[in-house]
Amino acid sequence: MGELGDKIKGNVNEAAGKLKQQSANPVTRDEGAAQELKGKGEQFKGKVKGLLGDDI
């Protein structure tokens, strides 16, 4: 997946994670926090690919 794909995937995961964190269920809130963190990681991966090129 290229730079743009990673950034989009990261944004989607981050938004879904934030929504899950609004739940009354503590398990769902924890899942949301983990999903938001995953999204931030994917966005970072996209930025690195942008700097180094998609060949990594």
Image (tube, rainbow, N blue to C red):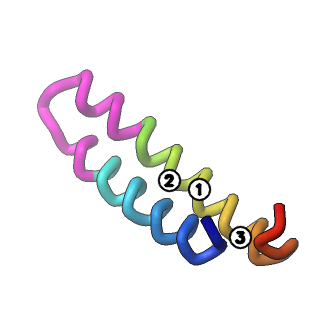
On the image, the x and y values in percent for residue 21 come to: 27, 41
**Which residue lies at the image location 40% right of the left edge and 38% below the top edge?**
33
Classify 10 Å Cα crowding around label 1: few (below 14), some (14-19), many (20 and above). many
Marking on residue 47: 3
Asked if labels 2 and 1 touch by Cβ distance under 8 angstroms, the answer is yes
Amino acid type, label 3: Lys
Dividing the image into 4 quarters, which one contains the N terminus?
bottom right
The magenta stretch is 19-33
Amino acid type, label 2: Gly
**Which residue lies at the image location 24% right of the left edge and 51% below the top edge?**
19
Residue 16 inside the magenta-drawn segment: no
Classify 10 Å Cα crowding around label 2: few (below 14), some (14-19), many (20 and above). many
Q: CA distance from mark 2 to mark 3?
A: 12 Å
Marking on residue 3: none
Residue 28: which quarter of the image? Answer: top left
Secondary structure under the numbered disc 1 in the rendered image: helix
24 with respect to 29 (left or right): left
Q: CA distance from mark 1 to mark 2?
A: 5 Å
On the image, the x and y values in percent for residue 47 come to: 71, 70
Amino acid type, label 1: Glu
Marking on residue 42: 1
Extreme residue in the right direction: 52
Asked if labels 3 and 1 touch by Cβ distance under 8 angstroms, the answer is no
Label 1 vs 3, first from the N-terminus? 1
Residue 29 inside the magenta-drawn segment: yes
Nearest the camera: 22 or 50?
50
Q: Which residue is mark 2?
A: 39
Extreme residue in the top direction: 27
Secondary structure under the numbered disc 2 in the rendered image: helix
On the image, the x and y values in percent for residue 34 come to: 44, 36
Dividing the image into 4 quarters, which one contains the C terminus?
bottom right
Label 2 vs 3, first from the N-terminus? 2
